Image (spheres, rainbow, N blue to C red):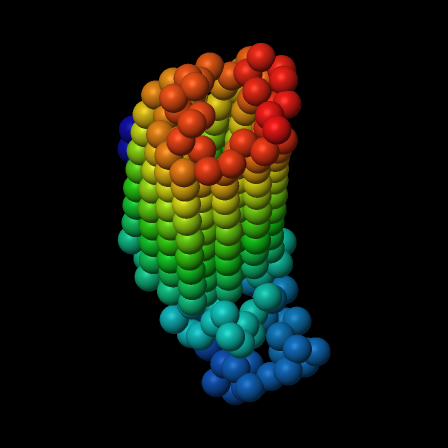
Amino acid sequence: MAGEKSKQELADVNFQSELLKSYTDRMGNFITFRKLLESGDKDKVRFGAKAITLSTLRVLEPHYKGLLVVFLYKSTLLNKEKRVLDLTDANVSDATLTNSNLHNINLSHANLSHANLIRANLSQADLSYTNLDDALLYEANLYAANLLSANLNGADLGYANLVNTNLQNASMIEANLSHTYMNDVNLVNANLFSAKLSYATVFNTILNNANLMDANLYSTNLAHAGLTGAFLVGVNLDSANLNYANLSKANLSEVNLIRTNLNGVNLSGANLSKAIVTEEQLSKAVSLKGTTMPDGTIHD
């Protein structure tokens, strides 16, 4: 039985290798003889290249999917400034792209759910509207990447570099963002329900109208962050740094703020009903105008 299994495994490997080789040969033909790189958006050669790419991806296993993506990237077919091959709705799920250099790649609208992108270089990549559900992005470099409206639910971004990243309208439900570097990030309207951001550096990041319900922000550095209108009910802010953060009109009802740094924070119009916070802490706020206080009264 063991011998039969080994033969089958070898046959599978050979099939996958031959399929990928056949694909790269055909794409090489498109590039060399049919001038794919010089083609226009509506040229037939592009439709043909996309058709064989999508059909091949549906059959390839994770390791070979990753090799296909790297081939397309190195062939300059997925360049952000001039994407020749549109991978919208392409099934790149489970692809193995560990340590891959994909700087400036355009994978907008692609399906990368469960993909392994550990320590991958995705700096300045276009990942807008991309499905990265449950993807592994541990220690990945996403500097200045565009993740507008991306799906990162359940993704592991621990220790990732997200500096200057656009995550507006992104869904990051139960994502792991602990120890991430998130300075100057756009998280406006992002959904971070039950996300883990403990020990993350979120300095000068905009989280206006973001949903942070039940998120873990233990020891998170949110200094100078914008949290106007953010929903923070059930959030863990133990030992968090909100130094000079803007929490105007934010909902912090019933939140425990006893060990939170509120120095210079703007709490104007915020909801602090039943929040656990001391008068000394509130005295350090830059504004409490119109704030609903822990006892339910409205501050002048």
Q: Judge whether 145 appears above or below 12 on screen.
A: below
Q: Quadrant of residue 74?
A: bottom left
Residue at (38, 50) in percent of width and height: 183
Residue at (51, 75) in percent of width and height: 81
Residue at (51, 16) in percent of width and height: 275
Q: Judge whether 242 appears above or below 226 on screen.
A: above
Residue 58 visible in image: no
Q: Quadrant of residue 40?
A: bottom right
Query: The C terminus is located in which quarter?
Result: top right
Which of 139 and 59 lies nearest the eye of the viewer?
139
Q: Judge whether 191 appears above or below 125 on screen.
A: above
Which of 53 and 11 lies nearest the eye of the viewer?
53
Query: The N terminus is located in which quarter?
Result: top left
Residue 242 point in image, percent of width and height:
40, 35
Which of 284 and 200 lies nearest the eye of the viewer?
284
Residue 239 visible in image: yes
Residue at (41, 45) in percent of width and height: 224
Q: Quadrant of residue 8?
A: top left
Residue 274 point in image, percent of width and height:
55, 13
